[in-house]
Amino acid sequence: MTAPNDRKHRIKRTSGPRSRKQAAGKGGDRRLIKFLSMILYLICAVLIVVYALMLVIGFFLKNIPESSHNSSSPSYVVTAAGEVKDYGAAGSEDPQKDKTAEGKGNPDGKAAEGEGTSDRGYVEGSGTAGDGYTRSFSKGYAGNDMEGKEPYSPDMEKKISDPPLREAPILKDAELLFGGNVYVSSYVEEAYDTGGGIEGVLSPAILSLSGEADFFMANQIFVLSERGEAYEGKEYVYRADPERVSILREAGIDGVSLANSHILDYGYEALTDTISALDGAGIDHTGAGENRAEAAGAVIKDINGMRTAFIGASRRVPDAMWGAGNERPGAFLCYDAEKERFLREIGLLNRSCDLVVAYIYWGDEGEEVPDYMRLLARETAEAGADLVVCSGVSGAGGVEYHEGTPIVYNLGDLMYGGGLREGYLLKVELRERENKMILSLYPVSSAMGYTRVEDDPQYYEFTGD
């Protein structure tokens, strides 16, 4: 007999065809597994083919000659002097190749000087000029570091062609005045204090010339500081109280060159104090600074619509370490080892300013201008200076005209100490209509802190024709 509920409780099979299929893969889905495997194999094959194609394409690209590269957009290289070079769209040069030789003294390929600039000279980088260069000028500088590196050579930039120098200065009616060495010594201070102010230091004729000048520049051979220690072993070291900067201001001096053999008489702190005192008095300065970039900076002034640059450099210091470095204060030097840098700065200024004045300090005693100085002055003229003014120790001067540029070799001393010192005061008249530069050299002498004109001036006329 069968129990009443037997049909509701079926017995499960533990063997037979159906149970074996279930044990083999829950329904026998082997075909699905095979399909998925085929997909994976196909993907791997595609990846292998793509990788092989990439290797082939890379091989051909690597072996394409550089001259066949072209670009539809301009390429630029920023030189170490701050200048933006435009290679154009023709692909005539590969700027990437020149990154280790972009400019003077920057073989690391770093793009730029001008970082951390102050208020002298120029920095190029923004704004557009008609020669294809990009420029912006706000009294920065274009110097850079060569410390511990190979000196700059023109061959380093042989692939970079500069626009030509302008043929002549672009003159406006103006009057410039240049003095030689100035030192606010104890004799000058006494003459000022007892002689009724600046009239006790400079004669009426000199003050008249100063008052008429649009810009008066001299060579400051002392520091304005009460800090620091005298340079060991140096026979003559010069400094004055920072408050005595007022004597320079009352003399009508608008700018000074600090590139000389006295600017570090009392060390780096005294140089810093000197710069601060001059800035506080509104007197521009060039030729020395907290680093090489600042020391190389030119003073750039708009004089009656004429963009005028004044740059100072020294060919006389007691020690090579007096030259400014990347992070070392000092003077901007123009010895043979640094000359290319100095000449490069002159060329950059020529292309961006209407008139460039180079003020160089040197130091040989004697009746004749030494050959090295004559060579340097002429090279400065050829590099783009429109007027070269030199000052140094007492000695013979003279005026020369070299390839369209007047060179005045030695202004000597203007404001000094107790003994008799002689020099010249240079007046430069610029006439736009006649395109003429008229130089007048006034012989001056200084004794007991007082300076006067000794004789009638010597006249020289130069035209841009």
Image: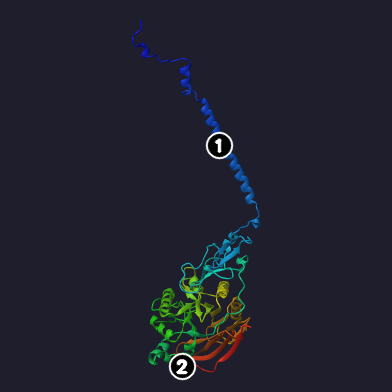
- 140 w.r.t. 373: above or below: above
**Pointer 2 residue:** 204
Question: How is the protein colored in the picture?
Answer: rainbow
How far is the residue under mark 1 from the one under mark 2? 97 Å
Name, please, the residue furthest toward the top. 1
Q: For residue 183, which numbered disc appears in the image?
A: none
Q: Residue visible at 48% across and 67% down? A: 115
Q: Is residue 256 visible to the viewer in this orientation of the structure?
A: yes
Look at label 2 and name its amino acid. Pro
Q: Position of residue 299 (x, y in %)?
A: 49, 77
Look at label 1 and name its amino acid. Ile
**Pointer 1 residue:** 43
Pointer 1 local density, CA inside 10 Å: few below 14, some 14–19, many at least 20: few
Quarter holding the C terminus? bottom right
Pointer 2 local density, CA inside 10 Å: few below 14, some 14–19, many at least 20: some
Which residue is at the front of the view, 147 or 283? 283
Which residue is at the front of the view, 437 or 329? 437
